[in-house]
């Protein structure tokens, strides 16, 4: 079973950083919300391992993905935010992108 800690998948992701505890890799940091129940997480310190986390009722499903796949997902999210004009979220996600991938 996974330790959800204070994880609330429906909270405003920009208001605070979100962390979850993976049973093998420890604390994961939420990079971004992708869809209603899917989010991109990375390991807290190295930011080299990425997980697509799906929220299902009272369970979390962790799917390991490559760094390049994570980058593509984040690129797609940035593109979507640019089209919708959500500038506060866009500027914060651009900073995370630079910190993580450049």
Image: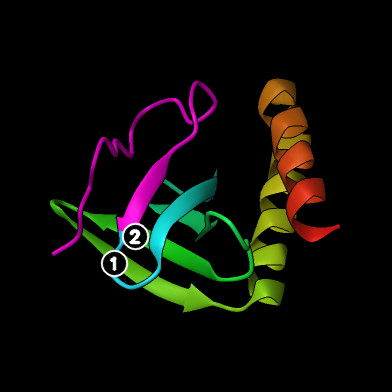
State how far apart marks 2 and 1 are (Cα).
Answer: 5 Å
Q: Count neighbours of disc 1 (C-alpha within 10 A) and say few if under 14, some if 14 to 19, many if 20 or more.
A: few
| Residue 75, position as x, y percentages in the image | 75, 56
- Look at the picture and state if 63 lies above or below 21: below
Is residue 11 within the magenta segment? yes
Question: Quick one: 90 or 84, which is closer to the camera?
Answer: 90
**For numbered disc 2, what is the local secondary structure?**
strand
- Up the image or down, 100 lies above or below 94; here it is below
Query: Which residue is at a point 13% across and 65% down the rendered structure image?
Result: 1
Q: Nearer the viewer, residue 79 or 28?
A: 28
Image coordinates of residue 92 in percent, x first then y, are: 71, 31
Q: Which residue is mark 2?
A: 54
Q: Which mark is residue 61?
A: 1
Q: For the magenta stretch, what is the residue range?
A: 1-21
Q: Is residue 83 visible?
A: no
Q: Residue at x 44, y 25 (%)?
A: 12
Q: What label does residue 88 carry, if any?
A: none
Q: Vertically, is 102 above or below 98?
A: below
């Amino acid at each position: 079973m996974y330790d959800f800690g204070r994880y609330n998948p429906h909270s405003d992701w920009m208001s605070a950083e979100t962390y979850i505890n993976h049973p093998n890799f420890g604390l994961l940091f939420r990079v971004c919300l992708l869809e209603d129940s899917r989010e991109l997480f990375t390991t807290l310190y190295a930011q080299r391992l990425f997980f697509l986390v799906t929220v299902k009722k009272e369970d979390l499903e962790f799917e390991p993905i490559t760094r390049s796949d994570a980058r593509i997902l984040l690129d797609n999210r940035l593109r979507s935010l640019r089209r919708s004009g959500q500038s506060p979220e866009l500027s914060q996600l651009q900073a995370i992108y630079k910190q993580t991938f450049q």
